[in-house]
Image (tube, grey):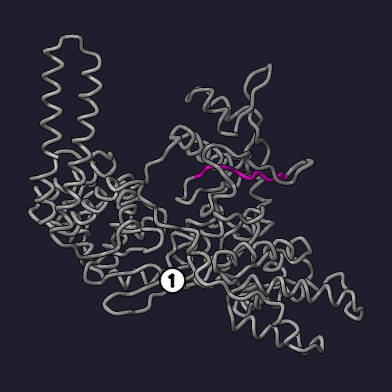
Amino acid sequence: MNTLSQEKINEIRNSVNIVDVISSYIPLTPKGKNFFGVCPFHDDTNPSMSVSPSRQIYKCFSCGATGTVFKFIMDYENISFMEAVKKVANLGGVSVNIGKVQKKQKHTELHQIYDLSLKFYINNLNLAKGKEAREYLKKRNINEDVIKEFQIGLALKKDTLSKILIQKFKPEDVLKSGLIGKNDYGYYDLFYERIMFPLYDLDGNPVAYSGRIYNREDNSKYFNTRETEIFKKGELLYNYHRAKDDARRKNKVIIMEGFMDVIRAYTVGIKNVVATMGTAVTDIQAKLIKRMAKEVILCFDGDEAGAKATMACSNELIKIGVTPKVVRLEDDLDPDEYIQKYGKDSFQRKIDNPISVMDFKLSYLKVGKDLTSSTDQAKYIKELISELNKIDDDILKDLTIKKVSVEMNIDESLIRNHLEKKKVNHTLKKIKPIATTNKYEKAESSLVYYMLKSPEVITMYSNKVTYIPNKEYRMLAREINNFYKNFGFINEADFIDYIECDSELMETINKINRENTKETYTLEEIEDYINVIRDYNVQEEIKRLTNKMKNLTDPLDKAKIAEEIVGLKKGV
């Protein structure tokens, strides 16, 4: 539970306008009394999210996502309720002392192991034995400030960390961490004689390392922690926790491949930058990128592998409605090398003047083709059409067609006739309202839905409904009823904040919002819902008594239960 009163929570929420806050994350367009935008919580390309300034809540009519400004920030930034409250308090200028808030973590032992290992590695770098590593970093233009900011450390001998961890934690947890190995001779460090670059989760907790050799020969320049319960490469972006706020302020995020590229950019003041860790971009990473900023710039390595990675990443982003821009670096350099060779100003000019993703693709598709050959020309046009079909940006599509038409001396219609016709609302079809299985569940869902909106319906529920069969609806109805009893009113925004966005209750609220869209009701409708629920309970009780009667042998006991059943049937 939080340490703030409900009144203080309400004051903080009312200190801002939900439209102003949400519009700083996603574009909103006024329509009637509300504002509409593309929902960031599912693969949406059409404005299906409504934001109500009067009710101070948002609701997606497609996926059912609902909540207040706190819930939006929680889900968008992947932070806890109290972290979101603190953020809104700062936006609204409300003085509040929440202290340090930490997100609840699973696998606490692994997080503790990594916290201790990080302190150990950082300390090693500052020892006399760390002099050679410090000199190596200095030669690579990584100064003391960068070392501190990115918590760079040093692994020394092969059995030092393992001794400390085995004494403090369970051996099975230590082995799960990916830091320690075991053989016939005992436990040993997997990282030794390497400069240690910590890798973080989305909240900024160390969860893995990339260790670089600096004083010896080795088959691998870098050695990375294997995937563990807390380190899933495809679910993280390097530097996300540092970059997200700067990216949102600038409404621009730069994507690179390696963590050293990010560190180098950071040293020259470019802080809205994250890295994919050199792997193919996953759907999860693409969605994280989409939430960070409207403008996305891909700046991968300048070699052929970097071009291929740029192509793959751009297509993954295009799938979810993001049309990125591209920066390509000369001389096959990566961003780290480019900045060191040509300086910050030259790199900044590159970032300020990216090319369109289609200009990049036009160049990429020409590689290895002889465009004086009709065969290669035909192949190039076919591949181009395939890429054009992936993007929704009609202006970019049109400009590209005109450019290729002139360049290849072909009629525009040749390309346009092969383009797929735009599919309307194709992403919205992915999410359908959950169909209620029967009239009983529909009645429960609708009754609870209107309880969130009206004290009149809560009173009818309290007086006439003894039991809601479906557990998730029953728990939500109970919480709504308790809120009304405690405070004497019902307000959807206040209630959502009251339950602190409890994940199970919020999922139920999202579900009933997908199943019910009408804001108004009649008393006759509510009475019908209550009667359907009552009918279900009676039918279930008749079933129970019938089964009980089958197991009785005494005729008088059977007659007594039969009388109960008749009475129940008469009351239906």
Q: Secondary structure at mark 1?
A: helix
Apparent side of residue 529 relative to residue 61 in the rendered image (left or right): left
Q: Position of residue 49 (x, y in %)?
A: 37, 67
Foreground pick, 496 / 360: 496
Which quadrant of the figure has residue 489? Answer: bottom left
Question: Per the image, is 120 magenta?
Answer: no
Q: Position of residue 25 (x, y in %)?
A: 41, 68
Q: Is residue 223 above or below residue 487?
A: above
Give the quarter of the figure containing the N terminus: top left
Q: Position of residue 332 (x, y in %)?
A: 78, 66
Apparent side of residue 508 relative to residue 488 in the rendered image (left or right): right
In the displayed image of the protein, which residue is found farthest to the top? 554
Foreground pick, 207 / 487: 487
- Magenta part, dominant SS: strand
Q: Position of residue 219 (x, y in %)?
A: 79, 41
Disc 1: CA contacts within 10 A as few (<14), some (14-19) or many (>=20): some
Q: Which residues lie in the magenta part? A: 206-214
The residue at 22%/67% (across/down) is: 55
Foreground pick, 250 / 506: 506
Apparent side of residue 536 relative to residue 157 in the rendered image (left or right): left
In the displayed image of the protein, which residue is found farthest to the right? 373
The residue at 57%/27% (across/down) is: 175
Question: Per the image, is 209 magenta?
Answer: yes
As shown in the figure, which amino acid type bears the numbered disc 1?
Answer: Arg
The residue at 49%/23% (across/down) is: 170
Apparent side of residue 448 relative to residue 557 in the rendered image (left or right): right
Q: What residue is disc 1 on?
A: 249
